[in-house]
Amino acid sequence: MESSNAFWIILQRLRTPLIVLIVTYAIAILGMVIIPGADGNGNPYHLTFFDAFYFVSYTASTIGFGETPYDFTYPQRLWVMVVIYITVIGWFYTIGALVAIITDKTLNQELLKGKFVRQVQKLNREFVIILGYNYVHAEVIKKLTKADIDVVVIEQDEEKLNLFQLDESSMGVPVMVADALLTSTLKEAGVGSPYCRAVVSHFYKEEKNLRITILTRFINPTVKVITKATYEDTMTSILDTDVAKIENPFEIFAKRFDIAITAPHILTLENWIYKNADLTDEASLLPNGRYIICGYGRLGKLLQEKLDKHGMDYMIIDEHVIPSQTMIENETFIRANADNKDVLLEAGIESASVLVAGTQNDIDNISILVTAKKINPDLYLIARANTMKEFTIFEETGANWLFMIEKILINKTSLQLSQPLKHAFLKKILYKDENWGTSLVNLLKAQLGVNPQLLHLTINEEKAYAIYSAIKENESIPLNVLLKSLEDWESYHKAIPLFLKRNGEEFLLPSNEILEIGDQILFACNKESREEIELIASNIYDLQYVRTGEDKENWLLSKIFK
Amino acid sequence: MSLQKVISGFFIILAMTLNFGFFYGDMGNPAMHSTYELFGALVISLIATALKIGDKTQIGSVLLATSLVADIQLIIAVIVWAVVEYSLGGMTSSHMATVISFSGGALLANITSVVLYIGETLKSKR
């Protein structure tokens, strides 16, 4: 019944026009029958109901065949005038009502909703529900459709949805204008479907995110909710639902900041995996010395924690926050507007080495950057860009490291949805130290150049037929087999296995694990080694060659003539 | 008391009474069945149908179905009458019987409507 709402709306709206039409016709016909006329010879003649219906039908529709079956008398003509006016007006009214229904907004929304629900029900592979269409989600949708993952979009603002439908990534994407905070909307969007993999919700108001997480939890606890939360209480409440993956951009950035102090090459690796930069990128190498942090909110507090942890020298500037006792005693806080030359000088900008412009206001941040750069051109500048709107201006200011909240959300969301293996690898390496990072970066650079490709191989029938069937026959295939050269089976090609994932187990830089069905392996490789890995994995002759060294043809013939 | 209920009840019952008026009398004798009454029965039945359109309740759907049945029966009766009168050279008693039996079918549907309507009313007054 739900989906035929549109049909009921039409019927309900047509009720009055239909009654008007029936009544006017009835009056007209009855009048025509009752009023006496005359036949050709002047004898009295009453129109039959058939005659009357025939006449009214063509008169009401303004066709007008003339007076049948005989010429009308004057009393009849008088009535015909009444007939014309009431029936024609009745028809106009009905047609007007029909047109109004067709252009009606509620009706159109109902029709679209019906279409949406049908489209969602037809989805027969994994999909992701995107709640709200904003800059972050627009980019996430692009990346997901590129990775061939279906998405469903809900947005309350029709204009924004129209904007989305102009975009080419909207082809075939089910969209609906609706309030995402309602259970019924989430159900219609397919949260209950076994194919629904995740719900993505990055509302600015974090209570909305919490609400969506809780609703989803009760509709379908197997669906993951990917959401944003930056305040302590919302974060814990969302985590309590057990279905959410929280993205807190401030925490993500603070973690990067921490790593940048202790192990910058890990960040180089991360940027390479996110495809932001190649392996030569060393932008995140933070200099030693005094740090000045402008803005003491969610970001400032997290950064302070990290600086304290490493015992660094720092100064915090914020106009609106009252400092704690210890901060006053340690003289690490100035209560003033950071966008001021004197204040910056007081904070010791001339001798400082790093400045973080981290307030909530983009224009303030830009202004701080410009002032600071003028006083001390050697400063390493970290800037917080709250939206992508002022992105180009931030680049102009010459900031060394841009902390873009939206970019972090985009990268993180799309990577964990479209390439979970890479995401798992990144999560693992963030806990490694600088030595590990440097050696891996150097190894990659030496073997594969500054921008190696990544290859994701799953051991299954479709992607790695040869290995799959060998394992099925109880042969043990070590990972090394995949790295052997097809030119010479005793040497190796250049690919480096970075990560191996097997139900629940994860191996970082696996050396020579015995492969199992369902293993997922991440390789760093170049074009040639990528081809070799794919050939060995899927071609039984190539696999046989690299395992035994027997020539392919010989082995084939021996198999045939056995 | 709601005006809505009075109006829809009025039309449902009027459709039945008019139809009965037309139906009552010698089956084969055209003189005993007024065309005016058939016309009235059809028009009132159509209005009763239009009034029930768009009612999404359970009882509303059943009432709509029964009155659609009545409409179709009456329309067929009218068409039969018109065809017999103008194409087959005039009404005979056997043709008249056909028309009357169609209207009898419509009468049954009307009665069902009324019974359902009264049942619904009694239930709601509980």
Image (cartoon, coloured by chain):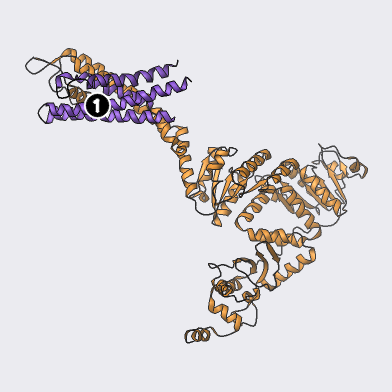
Residue at image mark 1: B104
Q: Position of residue A138 (x, y in %)?
A: 58, 48
* Above or below B8: residue A259: below
Q: Who's the residue at 64% across and 61% down the image? A: A421
Q: Which chain is orange?
A: A
Q: Position of residue A173 (x, y in %)?
A: 50, 48
Left/right placement of residue B49 relative to residue B33 reads right
Of residues A413 and A2, the one nearer the viewer is A2
Q: Who's the residue at 68% across and 51% down the image? A: A408
Q: Tell me the shade of chain B.
A: purple
Q: Position of residue A10 (x, y in %)?
A: 40, 32
Of residues B18 and A419, the one nearer the viewer is B18
Of residues B24 and B36, the one nearer the viewer is B24
Is residue B40 visible from the viewing direction of this image? Answer: no
Left/right placement of residue B95 relative to residue A384 reads left
Left/right placement of residue A352 relative to residue A365 reads right
